[in-house]
Image (cartoon, rainbow, N blue to C red):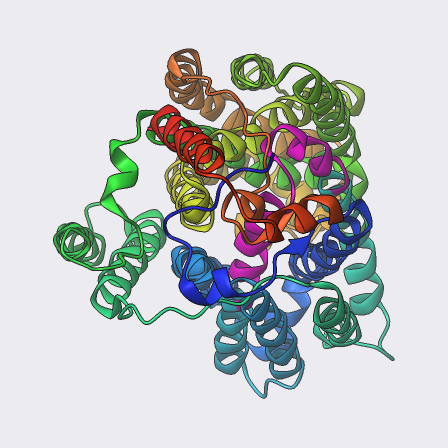
Amino acid sequence: MHAPPSDALSNDAAAQPPIVLTRRRINTIFGALLAGMLMASLDQTIVSTAMPTIVGELGGVSHMAWMTTAYLLATTLVMPVYGKFGDLWGRRTLFLVAIGLFTVASVGAATAPDFGWLVVWRGVQGLGGGGLMILSQAIIADIVPARERAKYMGPIGALFGLSAVAGPLVGGFFTDHDSLGWEWAFWINVPVGLTAFAIGWFALTLPRKKNSTPIDYAGILALSAATTSLVLFTDFGGRDGWGSWQALTLLALLVVSAVAFVAVELRAAEPIIPMTLFRNRTFVVATALGMAVGLGMFSAIAFMPTFLQMASGLSAANSGLLMVPMVVGIIITIQGSASFIMRTGRYKVFTIAGVAVIMAAMIWMTTLSGDTSLWTIGGMFLALGAGLGLIMQNVVLAAQNAVPADQIGTATSTNNYFREVGATLGVAVFGTLFTSRLADNLTGALSGNAEQAGQAGITSPDTLVPSAVEAAGDPLRSAIVDAYANSLAPVFWYLVPILAVGLLLALVLKEIPLSEHAGMVARGEAVNSEAELAALSAPATVDELVVLEDDRDDEQRLRL
């Protein structure tokens, strides 16, 4: 017996014949999702590698951070919008729109006449990238039962691992060959995007819905103001100081817009982020846990590559190889936990273990020094990856499983939104701690080896690049590497208390039995087999309808 349709199912959706979710159809849809995610994930690592060349040629070195800020801001802004609109109108068209935006913006970025236009097109890319991230997770929840969902995370983890390794190599290849140039870091997205769009057009057989509910424009505007204020607050605070007038003004705007957003959402007919979600204890704990881990974990990931390039002498193009241990850790733990979850339906143990492993890795990373071997650093990355693979997808799974089937998209986007907020705050705050220490330590390293620094052409900490450090030789090279290590290692201690809070949240997370039905099946938009489709056409008895109603009420009470 399939799960009963939700009360929220629209008349239009109910009138459509249910889709049969055969294994072949599920795999075809999943392939379309992977094509879209590959484009977005590969772009990030390619552009990061080509960034120094891009900003140098377009005269934007002093404003380099806006390349990242524009993409991050746009991605975070649209997450809740894609999630809610997908619940209301269906996800197929939105997914194709996201691919289209990303592809068109890639053309715009490749032909950008100056740095300002490049930043604009990076923002448009973010509008597409945010949709690809959220809609992919929501569509997987639509077509795969929660108990089986973890096994689909393995290929996704492998895909992001491939991007982490291949992206820097491809980006370095483009920038190192004059016949190609940095523009190809964006041109490469065009054939990939067109292919992903074609696959999505034919493979994404998902229901389309009609909904006459007024759009929550006021909520979108208030949330956009709050998100923009937050991202710019971290940007100006990290650069000009947290007490600067710019940072304080943006902080005030953040508070005002956040209060306005809550007031608007409490009155909206279909709020972008329903406040009722925050009455759901399991959803709140899972989302807070994701935010805490995002704040701590991604801070470490953000700054380690810089140290590794300085310590190893590898170019940015080859630095992706240093991320292989983390990718291996992610794949091993995702795959290992997936089979256990499918057999037992238990996932809480992995959230606890994930935070504990990350915390242990963070404490280990406080021992970082200039003479730490690459093998030891590889072990640190392996541990980080193992922790990440254990927790991140299970946090999303817990949030999705805690809400009714008609709120899967909204729950997914809200959970991801707060994780991105945590990552943004973490990178900004701990980046400030790192860079302030680094400036002092590098100044001391250069002044202590002034003659050698002058011969190597290193006149300022701001002009340091890995190749120059490697070419300088010892003792200057060792002094610079020690400066990086001594600046970075203490920062990890600040992350440990945050992860301790995350561990406490993991311990109190309520483990709800995983749903046996895919989201579309639970909403009555799909069935699992042709036999079920045939059974639906037969008239149901009164007793059968009563049983279905009781099953639905029991499941809703369990989630709340």
Residue 340 is a magenta residue: no
Query: Going by the image, does 180 lie left or right of 161?
Result: right
Front-most of 219 and 422? Answer: 219
Residue drawn at x 61%, y 83% as measured from the top left: 108
Q: Quadrant of the N terminus?
A: top right
* Left or right: 300 as drawn, with respect to 466: left
Seen in the picture, residue 441 relative to 115 is either above or below; the reply is above
The residue under the point 44% across, 64% down is 74
Return the x and y of residue 514 as percentages of the image width and height. Answer: 54, 25
How many marks the image carries: the answer is: 0
Question: Can residue 484 be seen from the camera position used here?
Answer: no
- Magenta residue span: 128-155
Q: Quadrant of residue 235?
A: bottom left
Asked if residue 130 lies in the magenta stretch, the reply is yes
Percent across and percent down for residue 12 are 45, 67
Q: Which of these two is toward me, 255 or 431?
A: 255
Query: In the figure, is residue 216 to the left or right of 138?
Result: left
Q: Quadrant of residue 295?
A: top left
The x, y position of residue 513, in whole percent, is 51, 20
Residue 37 visible somewhere in the drawing: yes
Q: Position of residue 81 (x, y in %)?
A: 39, 61
In the rendered view, would you say 487 is above or below 87?
A: above
Which is the main secondary structure of the residues drawn in magenta?
Answer: helix
For the C terminus, the quadrant is top left
**Relative vertical location of residue 180 with respect to residue 353 in this rendering, above or below:** below
Picture layout, residue 229 above or below residue 550: below
